[in-house]
Image (tube, helix red, strand yellow):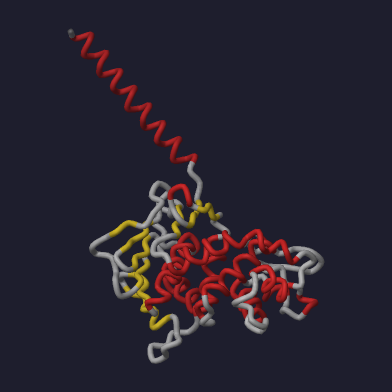
Amino acid sequence: MVVLVVLALICGGLAYAGFRIYKSVSTALIVPGCQAGSGTSALPVDPDQAPIAATVAGVAARMGLPLRALEIGYATALQESKLTNPTYGDRDSVGVFQQRPSEGWGTAAELENPEYATTAFFSALVKVPNYLNIPIDQAAQDVQHSADGSAYSQWDDTAEFLATSYVTTPHAVTCWYTPAAHAKASLASAGTGLVDVFGPTGSASAGAVLQSVSSGRSGLEVQVRPQNGWAVANWLMSNASTYGLTKVSYDGWEWSASLTETSWQATPSGSTGSILAS
C-alpha cells in the first residue's frame, strides 16, 4: 500500500510538472498581436499596423471626416504600405501613404510621421469632387495618382471592416502583449500623443474630440465626445505597449495587457463617462 501511495504521488508530481512545462511553452509560443472583430470574422492586425490604424482613425476624427473618408484612407494605406510606416519606397516615396517629398507632400522626416502623412492625405482627399460618393479606388487614385489606381479596390471590404471596428463598434479591437515587470506607464507621453493625433483639448468647443486630458494617481483620464470615445480608447489600447499602459477602460469595458487575455471584459466598475488608462 505504501508503494502504491508513493507511486501515485510521483505520478501526480510528474503530471503537474508536465502541465507547468506545457503551460510555460504554450505561453512562450504566443507572440504579441492585435485583431479587429472576433470569432471567425476576426481580422488579424500586426502590432506595427494597429497603432497606425488607430492614428489614421484619430486624424479623421480630428478633421471631422465621415466614416467613408476613413475607409478611403485605410484602403489607400493598405495598398501603399500594408498599413505600415516604411522609410523607403518607389523612387523617393516614404511613409504609410508612400508620399513623395519631390511632389510637394512634405519632407521625408515629416512623411515618416503617420499623423503628418495622414493629415496630408485627408487634406488632399477632401478637395476631390464628390469624393464621398465615387468608388473608393477612384477617390484614392485622385489623390495618389498611382500607376494602377484599380488596385485600391481590392481593399474595400477590409477598409470598411477596420473603419467600423476602430470607430463605431464598441470593444471591437484588441491587442495582447506582456508588459514589462515593474515598468511605470508614461502617462504624460501618452497624453501628448493623444493631443498630437486627436487635436488640442477644448471643453468649450463642440468640435474638439478631446474635452480634457489629465493624469493623476489613478492614471490618465480623458474626457471625450461620445461619438469619438471608442476611437480614442482604441488608440490608447493600440499604443499601450509603446507607453507601458496595462489597463484601458471605457463605457463599462476594460482591457488589460496580457499574452493570454485577448478581449475587452465587461466590468461594473468600468468608466462610463471618461476613458481611463494606467
Viewed as shown, does residue 212 lie left or right of 239? left
Q: Position of residue 55 (x, y in %)?
A: 54, 70
Q: Position of residue 211 (x, y in %)?
A: 39, 83
Q: Nearer the viewer, residue 179 or 151?
A: 151
Q: Nearer the viewer, residue 84 or 187?
A: 84
Q: How many marks?
A: 0
Residue that extends furthest to the bottom in the rendered view of this protein: 204
Quadrant for the N terminus in the image: top left
Q: Nearer the viewer, residue 262 or 189?
A: 262
Instruction: Look at the picture and state if 35 lies above or below 184.
Output: above
Viewed as shown, does residue 105 lie left or right of 118? right
Instruction: Look at the picture and state if 19 lies above or below 204.
Output: above
Residue that extends furthest to the left in the rendered view of this protein: 1
Residue plotted at (49% across, 39% down): 29
Q: Position of residue 278 (x, y in %)?
A: 36, 65
Q: Position of residue 191 (x, y in %)?
A: 44, 75
Residue plotted at (35% across, 71% down): 275
Residue plotted at (76% across, 76% down): 101
